[in-house]
Amino acid sequence: MQYRLNEQLALRGWEDKPFAVQNLKSGQVFSLHEDAFRALQFCNGVMDMDSVLIPGGYRKLTRAFAEQKLVDACAESRPLLPIQEYHSFPCYYIDSAHWSITGACNMSCRHCFLSAPQAKFGELSHDACKSIIRQLGEAGVPTVSLTGGEPLVRGDFLELVDALTEQGIRVAQIYTNGLLVDGALLDALDARGIRPEFSLSFDGVGWHSWLRGTKGAEQRATDAIYLLRSRGFSVAVESAFHRGSIGSMSETLLLLAELGVAHWKVNPVSSSGNWLAEDASLNVSPEELYDAYLELIARYFEEGSPLTMMLGGFFRCSKGSKEYDIPCKKQGSEEDLLCSSTRNTLYIAADGKLLPCMPLSGLPIQDEMPSLCDITLTEALSGSRYSERIQTPVSTLLEHNPACAACEYRTQCGGGCRAAALAANADNDYLGRDPATCAFFKGGYEDRIRGVAEQYA
């Protein structure tokens, strides 16, 4: 009897994840015990699993795989597709790439930390983008999210999507302001069998058009959300609030829930890029923001957790649930990495620079990062200024900051957010203190969140 790996699965391996299976449809990767992986290798549609050459334990595992629909029995020889065959990648595993395929935009946002209205970081050529796509494939990156600027302004957008698909890379999300979302685009994606989640910007009821510097932007954003939902696409929303707009957060929550938005991510406007030219009185202090978040959490629970909501590092809760967590709170040790998410997700800037995360864009650290136009992704992951930064442990920050080392919250804070620290410190110190995370723990906000949540338990 021959068994064949399910056509949605492929055998993969990386330096730190040598025995893995990837779901080609979702992009998800699962690590396996070596014996289970070896047994799956025999399920190639050709090998006779009744052969005495096959260890008995492998035959038992194969029967279990068949029950789980991981493999299918086949009466005659049917080899694996080339994309399903085992491939080992010469680097450590990266779960996803977040890629600004352009630094240009069709809006004039007052708060853009990329200065996209001025196209500060430009746009790589089609051939340069194709080279980056090949590099992603060579590193075995399974999923990518496309952003900008505004990614849909690229005339070759769908060609890049096709190139990613040819490499076996799933386009998981498209970040957009919504102006260019129309039926033709959705038809083109449907024709390709691609159903990414769309993540739209919406910066508060009554405030979105002002912040985006575009008349009618608020209505056009809600129209895009409605169109996407009517076509069955999942929609997420990211919002940036300032002192003028934080009073609209509850109203915005209700609107997004009514529109059928699945995920809502909220952050304050970043003090970088174009926002530096705006009135500084619009900036909110961490305490002012956190107090507004507490009011929003209360309204959120009153409404029955109508969507999945993440308030920066302050609070995160899934739709319909009352169980929440605090993203900025770490449970590790001083030897953990400063930011574990940068170990799993990388960011490629519009100029080809490789950064630990997108919020570092436009800050001086971008100048010291490697460019994928100069070295390959696998080289950058193996040894570069980028790999050095993302592998920095908490202990290095504590050695650099005696006050942090003496703080009772040091292992819970874990140094906070590097982008927030750099934005808040004029001396461009990557190991500087993150005042927002510091204010969270020293201000007792964990207990205050718990107090709100207990009212609705």
Image: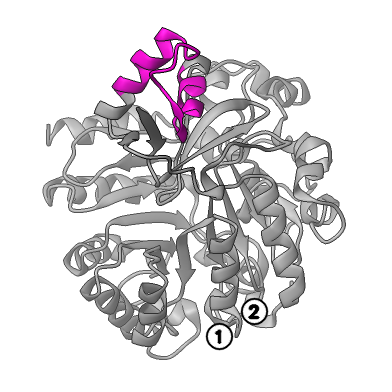
The quarter holding residue 405 reads: top right
For label 2, the SS is loop
Q: Please give the label number shown on residue 277.
A: none
Residue range (magenta): 36-64
Callout 2: 10 Å neighbours few (<14), some, many (20+)?
many
Residue displayed at 38% across by 32% down:
3
Q: Position of residue 262 (x, y in %)?
A: 27, 57
In the image, taking residue 325 as reference, residue 385 lies left or right, namely: right
Q: Quadrant of residue 258?
A: bottom left
Q: Residue at x 68, y 28 (%)?
A: 15
Q: Which residue is mark 2?
A: 104
Residue 305 percent coordinates (x, y): 18, 47
What residue lies at 50% left-to-right and 51% top-to-bottom?
Answer: 285
Is 38 in the magenta? yes
Write the residue at 30% across / 21% down. 63
Of the residues shown, which amino acid type is indicated by label 1? Asn
Q: How many marks?
A: 2
Is disc 1 in contact with disc 2, using a CB cutoff of under 8 Å? yes
Q: Which residue is mark 1?
A: 106
- Observer-nearest of 244 and 395: 395
Q: Relative to the observer, which residue lies in front, 386 or 58?
A: 58
**Label 1 SS:** loop
- Residue at the outermost right position: 374
Which quadrant, please, contains the N terminus? top left
Quarter residue 119 falls in: bottom right
Q: Is residue 242 visible?
A: no
